[in-house]
Image (tube, helix red, strand yellow):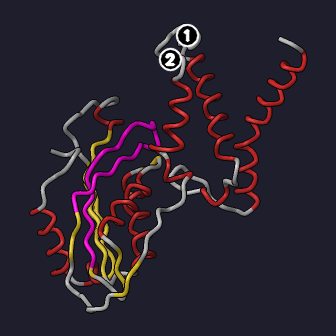
Amino acid sequence: MTSNATDQGVKEKISLQLTSEIIRHRLKEDGVRFHANDNISDYIFPGEFDTLQKEVEMRVKELLKSLLIDIDNDHNSQDTAKRVARMYLNEVFKGRYHKQPNVTDFPNARNLDEIYTLGPISVRSACSHHLVPIIGDCWIGIKPGDKVIGISKFARVADWVFSRPHIQEEAVMILADEIESLCEPKGLAILVKAKHFCMCWRGVKEPNTTMINSIVRGDFRHDPSLKQEFFELVKQQPNGLACN
């Protein structure tokens, strides 16, 4: 390898290593939290995403080497680092690095005030503790306010919120916050039922255990009959992908 090529390789490596540091410094300067389940897309500037992905790829290569996997000669593992980096940043953790899906709201022209539920919506996340999957179903109940959004948008926003490392209790709260900001409902209820692979794949290895949690706000919280109606409607809807 020529001296110029070596220098270029070193410069590229240094540049790649600095990408996350630059973004981290930007976040800290503004006093912005960047926990595992936070969205930081506003702090990733144009041109940085691809470089960040290359840095993650480099770090994953080092992890594989530390696990004593021969990434140079094992044909199954030669491109693993690239796949993992792309998967984390563009798929399973995309809710951290990509902006919220566009959601258009419409006026509640007919003054609808009856509740409706959607579900099951399939949600996929990862446990913040072990970075293994959380896969489950989500039900959303709405008592409309002055504006409404299309029902497909609930699924898109749920996918965006859950596509981050989470604990389930916090994921439901973040989803509730996002929905309230989008359509300002008079009442909101969310229920999530999910399997945690940190429990069924490792640890106690209980494959049939699920976790269920819910949150109710507005009229659902203050009117017990509405809350009961939501849970009765959920019972009438079948379980989906993960929880049969």
Between label 2 and label 1, give the one nearer the viewer. Answer: 2
Labels 2 and 1 touching (C-beta < 8 A): yes
Which residue is at the front of the view, 85 or 174?
Answer: 85
Circle 2 sits in a helix, a strand or a loop, which is it? loop
What is the CA distance from the residue labelled 2 to the residue labelled 1? 8 Å
Tell me the number on the disc at residue 125. Answer: none
Residue most extreme to the top:
73
Q: Which residue in the structure is indicated by mark 1?
A: 70
Tally of numbered discs = 2
Residue most extreme to the left:
236
Neighbours of disc 2 within 10 Å: few (<14), some (14-19), many (20+): some
Dot 2 or dot 1: first in sequence order is: 1
Image quadrant holding the N terminus, namely top right
Image quadrant holding the C terminus, namely top left
Give the residue type at disc 1. Asp
At 38% from the left edge and 68% from the top edge, which residue is drawn?
176
At 51% from the left edge and 31% from the top edge, which residue is drawn?
84
* Magenta region, residue range: 119-142
> As displayed, is residue 82 above or below residue 47?
above
At 49% from the left edge and 53% from the top edge, which residue is drawn?
95
**Secondary structure of the magenta portion, mostly?**
strand
Q: Which residue in the structure is indicated by mark 2?
A: 77
